[in-house]
Structures are given as C-alpha cells and as structure tokens.
Amino acid sequence: MTQERWQQLVQWPLLGAAMIFLVDYAWRVLADVQGEPGLILTLVLEAAWSVFLLDYLMNLVLAPQRWLWFRTHLFDLLVVVLPVLRSLRLLRLVTALSAFPRSPGTAVRSRVGIYVTSATVLLVFLASLAVLDAERRAPGANITSFGNALWWTFVTIATVGYGDFTPVTIEGRLIAVALMLGGIALVGVVTATLASWIVDRVAELTRDQGADK
C-alpha cells in the first residue's frame, strides 16, 4: 500500500464523513438534542472523527519522509484535533465538481474565488453553531439563539465588532480569535485576487492598443 493509493481509496469516505459530521453537528446544536438521542448523535460524531484519525495515522505511516509530511500537513492534524474544521473537507468536493476556464490566470482566480466563497459560508455556519453550543447555557451569556450567533459571527469575521453580542466563555472567545484571524486572511485573499484581475485587464488593454497601432 502506497500513500497515493491510500489517498485515492479514502477520498470519498472522507468527504462522506465530513458531510455526516456537518449534518450531525448542526442537528444536535440547532435542535438542542439531549438525552439518549443526543448520545446517539455524539456516537455518530465520534465515528466520523475516527475516520479522520485513521486517515491521518495511515498517511503518517505511509509517508516516505514522515517528519517532513508531519511538518507540511499541520492542517490535517488540526482537522483531527479541532472538530469544527472537519467539514472544510467538503471544499475538495466543491472544486472537484467545478469546471474552470482554460486560461491559467482565470482558472486560478476561479478556483480561489470558489474556495473563498465556500470556505466563508462553511466557516460562518460552523462558527455560529460552535459559539451557540459554547454560550447558550453559560451564566450571563447573550448569545442564546442561532440568530444572535449568526449575527455575532458576521460582525466578528468582518472585524467590525459592534459589541452588542459578546462571548463570555473561554471557548467562545477562542472562536472569536479564530474568526478575526480568518477574517483578516479572507480580506487579504480577496484583495490579492482583485489586484491580479486588474493587472490582467490592464495587460489585455495594453496588448489590444498595441495591436491596433
């Protein structure tokens, strides 16, 4: 068994596990499932987690240079450690099913645009679920509904921070820090993509004007 063969075998199971995790987690948080049904949903989450753990360990074992693979795949480790990141595996499905133009520059910008849009939607939804799950039973919390959590996530990821809703738990504040860092990164990616598009348009206009002369 080679690492390439293993990755081919587990590509779709990993996407399935990511989808199961997303649906299960959203159901548990939004419906506030407790008791035996909540235990069943938790067991399903753990089963999905075991798929990601197995994939990580197999890749580490099969990698020709294990230490190098470990250092260059820290995100894969975060996916195993941090539950919220597991659904981001679905981004691979989004780009795999997308048709990109043949122009290299346009293809790259299209791929980046789809990644950024999909990642933003997933990140906002998952962060809203996570902060609601962490906050709604905390003493003095004001993020006690999904609507409040969604609004707080939008203003936080945009680094606006109106302050009308604020997390009071350590988990909620850690989510806030991650969202602010993610918001800064997204702004940088969008700015770089827009700048690349402008440069290409200017270059095309220059070529057209040169051809007319």
Image (cartoon, helix red, strand yellow):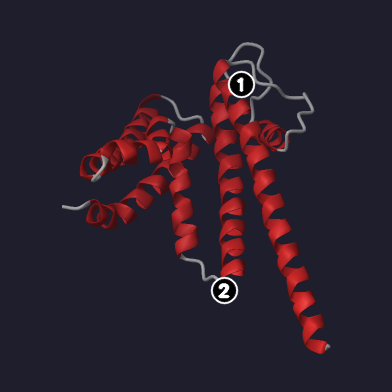
Where 78 falls versus 200 (above or below)? above
Give the x, y percent position of residue 158: 72, 38
Give the x, y percent position of residue 88: 48, 45
Amino acid type, residue under disc 1 in the picture: Arg
Give the x, y percent position of residue 28: 46, 34
Say which of marks 2 and 1 sits in front.
Answer: 2
* Numbered disc total: 2
Q: Residue at x 59, y 16 (%)?
A: 169
Q: Residue at x 24, y 51 (%)?
A: 3
Q: Residue at x 63, y 27 (%)?
A: 176
In the current view of this chain or complex, which residue is farthest to the left?
1
Where 51 falls versus 177 (above or below)? below
CB within 8 Å, label 2 to label 1: no
Give the x, y percent position of residue 197: 71, 63
CA gap, disc 2 and disc 1: 41 Å
Dividing the picture into quadrants, the one containing residue 48 is top left
The residue beneath circle 1 is 173
* Left or right, residue 91 beside residue 38: right
Give the structural element (helix, strand or loop) at label 2. Answer: loop
In the current view of this chain or complex, which residue is farthest to the top?
139
Dividing the picture into quadrants, the one containing residue 86 is top left
Q: Earlier in the sequence, mark 2 or mark 1?
A: 2
- Which label was assigned to residue 39? none
The residue beneath circle 2 is 101
Where 36 falls versus 104 (above or below)? above
Q: Residue at x 65, y 49 (%)?
A: 189
Q: Mark 2: give few (<14), some (14-19) or many (20+) Cα within 10 Å.
A: few
Q: Mark 1: give few (<14), some (14-19) or many (20+) Cα within 10 Å.
A: some
Dividing the picture into quadrants, the one containing residue 204 is bottom right
